[in-house]
Amino acid sequence: MLVKKNMCCAYIPRDRLMKDKVTRSVLRSSFIMDQRKRVLYTLTVVGVLVLLAIGVGVYNVTSHLDDVTEQVNEPLQRGKMSEKRESVVEPEMDNISVLFMGLDNRESELNGLADAMVLATFNREEGTIKSLSIPRDACVQIPGRMQKDKINHAHAFGGADLAVETVEDLLDIPVDYYVTFNFDAFMDIIDVFDGVDVDVPFAFSEQDAGGSLGAIQFDEGEQTLNGEEALAYVRMRYQDPTGDFGRMERQQEVMEQLADKAMSFQSIAKYTRAFHQLEDNMNFNFSFTELVSLQPYTSNLKKMDTYQLDGTERWENGIFYFDIDDESLTDVASELCEHLELDEA
């Protein structure tokens, strides 16, 4: 049961986190799955709705998606082609990559920190997807900055353009498309579909959407979360003994449950309401035709691999960082490059 109250529960001490070496399996899982459901949960809430609408194939829904696409399309300054490509990609024929970013911004503007980052590569011939969850606290070189900084700052410094460039430089592979969404949309869409069911691993408290510390109390066990509670559930990190890794696991859990809920509804009105919430809370550089070309991945996905990065957590001058292990980074980048069928440098 969930209740709001003005108190905080125990948390994991910072000095303990500093000593912990975080071991993240490079390849977390590789499996044959329920096609649409598994691809939906691993990406983001935006991926859930966009790909789901295409997979459902309901005319009224896809027609509304066409309208939304026109309103939220925001091309990158570089244009369609990545500097790491020799030609412009065509999703209906080529393998592509997409960077999904959930923004930590309370003002319904799309210029905040990237609170969640997932890079997904799509191999059309194989009918497979590989996705990498990028730790938001990863300490990396951001183009144009004098010193290394957290990767999630790239979007705040230079929007989607700089975030895409930073990820490209980190992994040395092209990022063809991006999707950004404000967490206001996350909360609203979950409420549209009457909440999500989760299994809370341990009791903890977290701040609410208004920033009140300890306002939302989570008890261990199965429960249904509304939008505000779900947002608090996926944002908590410091009370989790596995840190950012545990946080990403909870994000994936909520995405899977949201996909289940969304696919169980037959009401076009609910889909229309969901897309309406996205109009003011989302940007991407897909055209409607390019979105439609992703339909095979929702209807005939054969396999999906999900990746994490090995590394070490540390505190420096009161700031939390995640240092990526070089070998782990090389291994994951190589896997994604091979999946895109690119020649490695």
Image: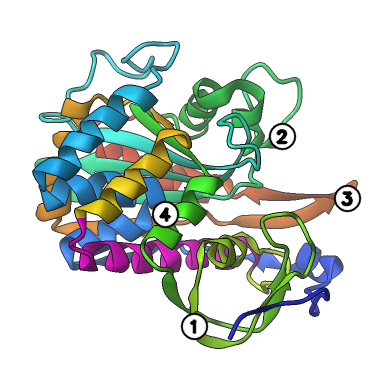
Q: Position of residue 323 (x, y in %)?
A: 67, 48
Q: For the residues marked 1 and 4, what is the alpha-carbon distance in whole angstroms? A: 18 Å
Residue situated in front as seen by the camera: 284 or 21: 284
Location of mark 1 (residue): 223
Location of mark 3 (residue): 318
Q: For the residues marked 3 and 4, what is the alpha-carbon distance in whole angstroms? A: 35 Å
Residue extending farthest to the front is: 269
Badge 3 crowding class, 10 Å Cα cut-off, few under 14, some 14 to 19, many 20 or more, is: few
Sooner in the amino-acid sequence: mark 2 or mark 4: 2
> Given this view, does label 1 or label 4 mark the residue nearer the observer?
4
- Asked whether residue 280 is in view, the answer is yes
Q: Quadrant of residue 109?
A: top right
What is the magenta range?
243-267
Q: For the residues marked 2 and 1, what is the alpha-carbon distance in whole angstroms? A: 37 Å
Q: For the residues marked 2 and 3, what is the alpha-carbon distance in whole angstroms? A: 14 Å
Q: Is 128 rendered above or below residue 172?
A: below
Q: Quadrant of residue 189?
A: bottom left
Q: For the residues marked 2 and 4, what is the alpha-carbon distance in whole angstroms? A: 32 Å
